[in-house]
Amino acid sequence: MTRLACVVAMTLGLLGCDDEVVGFADGGGGSSTSGSSGAELSTSSSTTGTLAESSSSSSGAVVEEGLPDYVAYGFETGVAVSFEDGEAWTDIPELAGVAAHEAVARGEDRIVLVGADQSAMTVDGLTWEVNPFGVPGYARSVAYGSGGFASVGLDHMAWSEDGQTWSDTLGPVVDLDLVALAYGGGRFVAVGVDQIAMSEDGQDWTVTAAPGEKLFALVFGDGRFVAIGEAGRILETQDGVTILRDEASGLAGLGGIRFCDDTFVVGGAERYWLSPDADAWTEVISIGQGAFACSGTSWVVAKAEGLFWAPELGVFDMAHTAKSVFYEVEFTGLGAQ
């Protein structure tokens, strides 16, 4: 059992763990621990062209070959990448002010960043080529699967095999308002405002009504898609058409959702929630929590003052002082696609 899964099981009272878990307490104790960063944790049940290469690293370390493990970005600010599992970072300031940065996805040999009417592609993490979509709408999210990249958004659906040249796949759909996209189980699924969409090839889509609070984050894990939204809404589906569960979760301030170490993890203001099944949740207080991502061997949090790193969910250390305002971070290492 992974350490994170052990923590979840322990706090839910399902079993005990032989190893000491630093930064957590059992469900009944509600204790906390502090690290060198001063953070505390407690638990309780409940434009077109090739851009110049950037080579500055926060640690001065030599950048490794291959694609980066993480990409952090802000809406219209710069981008930073990490080749060292989130511990050291390289700024890509040339991307600052280039349209909007809404979402990132890794393919077999490249990473694609989308936003508004443009996309940016890199095969090394350092040199990025920006291209116009050339299709209608506003891009909000991107995912890789079925041999290419799918992008969705506001009156926007597009497909690309290389992340540079895009085709319009919107078809007859009107009033499309999608926010988040994921791939898993041989299909793409997207959620947003009163809608859920599914495609097996990223080009032909089925859009189904899903009225309710806006859904803004989505992840595939344990053979199913789990979406979260405003007012604590949580929606679950296996095929992107049939909704298995759509209800209020009882959790306030929901942020992003990830599937890490066989555990669903939701981030919100000053806290995380952990669950082995996206049903029974354990609350973990984390001072100064921000957008987060995880690799299986590390965790990264993006906050206004910079990027923070930890080898496991616990006390985070400053890894990169912000030269740009990062509001999102995505794991793009092996296994991310």
Image (spheres, grey):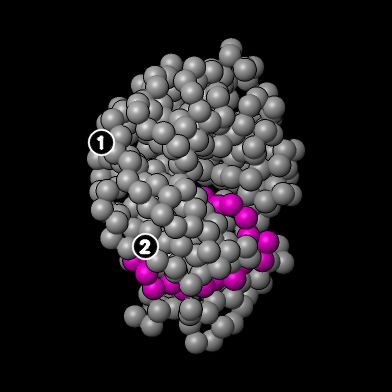
Tell whether 306 sits left or right of 111: right
Residues rendered magenta in the picture: 276-298
Q: Name the amino acid type tagged 2.
A: Asp
- Say above or below: 169 vs 187: above
Q: Name the amino acid type tagged 1.
A: Glu
Q: Which residue is under mark 2?
A: 246
Is residue 282 within the magenta segment?
yes
Secondary structure beneath label 1: loop
Q: Quadrant of residue 246?
A: bottom left
Q: Which residue is under mark 1?
A: 200
Q: Quadrant of the N terminus?
A: bottom left
Number of callouts in the render?
2
Query: Residue reaching furthest top?
Result: 49
Label 2 Cα crowd, 10 Å radius (few <14 / some 14-19 / many 20+):
some
- Say above or below: 337 vs 213: above
Residue 250 percent coordinates (x, y) = 48, 72
